[in-house]
Amino acid sequence: MNHDGGSGRVLVGLDDTANSWLAADWAAGEAELRGGMLRVVHAVHGITEAELELVSQGADQQVLDAAAGVLDDARARLASAHPGLRIETVLARDHPAEALLTAAEDADMLVVGTRGRGGFAGLLLGSVSLKVAAHAACPVVVARGNTERKAADGIVVGVRDERDEEAVRFALAEADLLRAPVRVVHAWTPLTHAGLMVPQVEDVDAERQVHARVLNHAARPVAEYPQVHVDTELAVGSPAAVLVEASAGAGLLVLPRHPPAGRLGLRLGTVVHAVLHHASCPVAVVPVR
C-alpha cells in the first residue's frame, strides 16, 4: 500500500518511442515501490465517423490492431522486467492528452515521457506531456534525463511559498519508499533598489529572513517523516537555474504547480516550464490545492 493509504495506482502514457519506453519502465518501478498496480494507456485518434465513409472499415481496424500490438508488446516487456506486478492496458480512442487526463482521474500518479510524436522538433518536451503536467489532478512525473533509480541520488523539492506543503509531503513519501534523502530548496532573486546596482546588506538580510520563514513553513511536513534525512536550503538566484543545477545530482526533482496567475498566465508557470525542459532527472509536478 502507498503511504497515503491509496491503492498505489500508477498510470503511464505510452506511444511507440524510446522515451516512452523509459517512462513505462520508470512507472513500473514506481508501482512496485508502492505495492500497487500499473495501468498502461495508449491512445489512437482512430478514424472519425465522417472519415469512415471515405475509407474502408479495414483501415480503421488496421490502426486499432497496430495499437493493440503496441500494448501487448508493452505488457510482455514490463512483465518480464517486473515479475509479479499487476499490469492493466487501456486502448483509448481519443487525443493522447485527453485520454490520459480522463484515465488519471482515479490515479495516484501519472507518468509521461519527454517527447510524443509531432509537436515542434526544437522542444524537448512534447505537447502531450506539457498539457497533462498543466492540467492533471494528480502528480505528474515527466521521466526525462537520467531515469535510473539509485537511493543515494536523493530527491530535491523546490518550494515557492507557504502553500507548497503538498509538494514537500509528496517528496518525503517518495523518499521514505526509496530510503533516500531529501533537499528542500527555496530560491529567490533579491530585489534591487532603483538606482542602486547592489542591494544594501541589511535589506538582503531582512529579505533572507522573510524567505527563511517561507521555507520553514513549507517544510512543516518534515515532522511527519522522522526517518527521512532532510536538508533545507535557501539559495539566492534564479529559481529555475538553481533547481536545474540541483537536478544534476538528484534521482527526482519535485515542483509544486500553482494555479495560473490571471486569465493569460502560463498554466505551468515559468519556473516549472523551464525546469521541465532542462532538468537532468525525472521531474514530478504536484498540483497545489
Image (tube, helix red, strand yellow):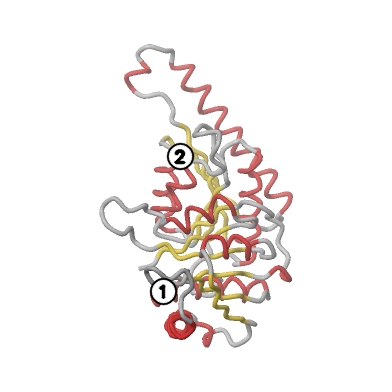
Give x and y (percent) for residue 91: 49, 39
Inspect the image, locate mark 1, and give the three-letter code of the amino acid beneath it: Asp
Give x and y (percent) for residue 234: 54, 77
Closer-to-camera residue (126/17): 126
Label 2, secondary structure: give it: helix
**Direction from residue 207 to residue 79 in the image, left or right:** right
**Direction from residue 125 to residue 96 in the image, left or right:** left
**Residue at image mark 1:** 161
Q: Quadrant of the C terminus?
A: bottom left
Q: Residue at x 66, y 40 (%)?
A: 18
Do residues under tags 1 and 2 come within 8 Å of each other at their CB atoms? no
Is residue 220 visible in the rendered image? The answer is no
Give x and y (percent) for residue 101: 41, 49
Inspect the image, locate mark 2, and give the three-letter code of the amino acid beneath it: Pro
Is residue 192 visible in the rendered image? The answer is yes
Give x and y (percent) for residue 286: 46, 64
